[in-house]
Image: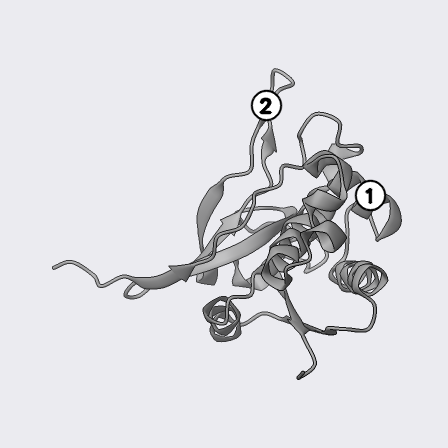
């Protein structure tokens, strides 16, 4: 008997933290996630020259800008740092309109609601600060871009862009889509939802 699969996936520009020219690439997953989400919102709002890659010469420059000015750290980016950084970047770039709403949570139903509403979600995996040191998770400490979900009986899946990976030979694999089982990783996940709301005209 075949399981019924339901789900949804958003179309986002992938950003790769290991791309040539990205400074401090090993800790640039937070800024890469921020860049992909703001690029998406730039296109959605019709303002790609303000908060998207069109403001910069390249995706690499976009990541480096966010790293340097909006919370990049050699040890990585906390969820609080991500929220503070993306809010400051959006406020600096767009002013007070649209209104910016951020929510931090760990709940598949809320994540699904964001995707269904057309809003990508930043998804952080962190077994170190959640004190789950000996667990086996998709990532030990890493930011990804939540772009969709799948629901099969009995599993719930996150669809994420992984921000790329470094190869042993010094090269890199570009950001790609991954399906990650939610229940198996729930203990180490933090999700940050971003919503930009234009005032009624």
Q: Are marks 1 and 2 in contact (CB under 8 Å)?
A: no
Q: Is residue 123 left or right of residue 35?
A: left
Residue 60, position as x, y percentages in the image: 72, 35
Type of colouring: one colour
Q: Nearer the viewer, residue 32 or 58?
A: 58
Q: CA distance from mark 1 to mark 2?
A: 25 Å
Q: From the image, tell me which residue sits under label 1.
A: 65
Image point 60% across, 41% down: which residue?
163
Q: Is residue 176 above or below residue 137?
A: above
Dot label at residue 167: 2
Image point 52% across, 74% down: which residue?
110
As helix, strand or loop, the secondary structure at mark 2 comes to: loop
Q: Specify the quadrant that holds the C terminus.
A: bottom right
Q: Nearer the viewer, residue 201 or 174?
A: 201
Q: Is residue 154 above or below residue 166?
A: below
The image quadrant that residue 9 belongs to is bottom left
Image point 74% across, 35% down: which residue?
57
Residue 43, position as x, y percentages in the image: 61, 55
As helix, strand or loop, the secondary structure at mark 1 comes to: helix
- Can residue 23 be seen here? The reply is yes
Q: Is residue 71 above or below residue 152?
A: above
Q: Specify the quadrant that holds the N terminus.
A: bottom left
Q: Nearer the viewer, residue 43 or 91?
A: 43
- Can residue 156 be seen here? The reply is no
Q: Residues within 10 Å of mark 1 (few under 14, many from 20)?
A: some
Q: Is residue 65 left or right of residue 105?
A: right
């Amino acid at each position: 008997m075949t399981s019924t699969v339901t789900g949804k996936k958003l179309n986002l520009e992938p950003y790769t933290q290991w791309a040539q020219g990205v400074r401090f690439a090993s800790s640039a997953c937070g800024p890469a996630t921020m860049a992909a989400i703001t690029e998406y919102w730039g296109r959605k709002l019709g303002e790609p020259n303000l908060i998207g890659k069109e403001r910069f010469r390249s995706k690499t420059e976009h990541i480096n800008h966010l790293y340097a000015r909006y919370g990049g750290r050699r040890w990585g980016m906390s969820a609080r740092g991500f929220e503070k950084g993306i809010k400051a970047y959006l406020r600096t770039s767009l002013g007070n309109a649209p209104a910016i709403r951020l929510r931090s949570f760990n709940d598949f139903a809320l994540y699904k609601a964001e995707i269904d509403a057309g809003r990508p979600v930043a998804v952080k995996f962190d077994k170190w600060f959640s004190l789950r040191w000996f667990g086996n998770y998709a990532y030990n400490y890493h930011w990804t871009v939540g772009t969709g979900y799948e629901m099969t009986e009995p599993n719930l899946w996150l669809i994420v862009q992984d921000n790329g990976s470094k190869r042993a030979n010094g090269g890199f694999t570009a950001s790609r889509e991954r399906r990650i089982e939610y229940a198996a990783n729930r203990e180490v996940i933090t999700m940050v939802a971003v919503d930009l709301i234009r005032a009624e005209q």
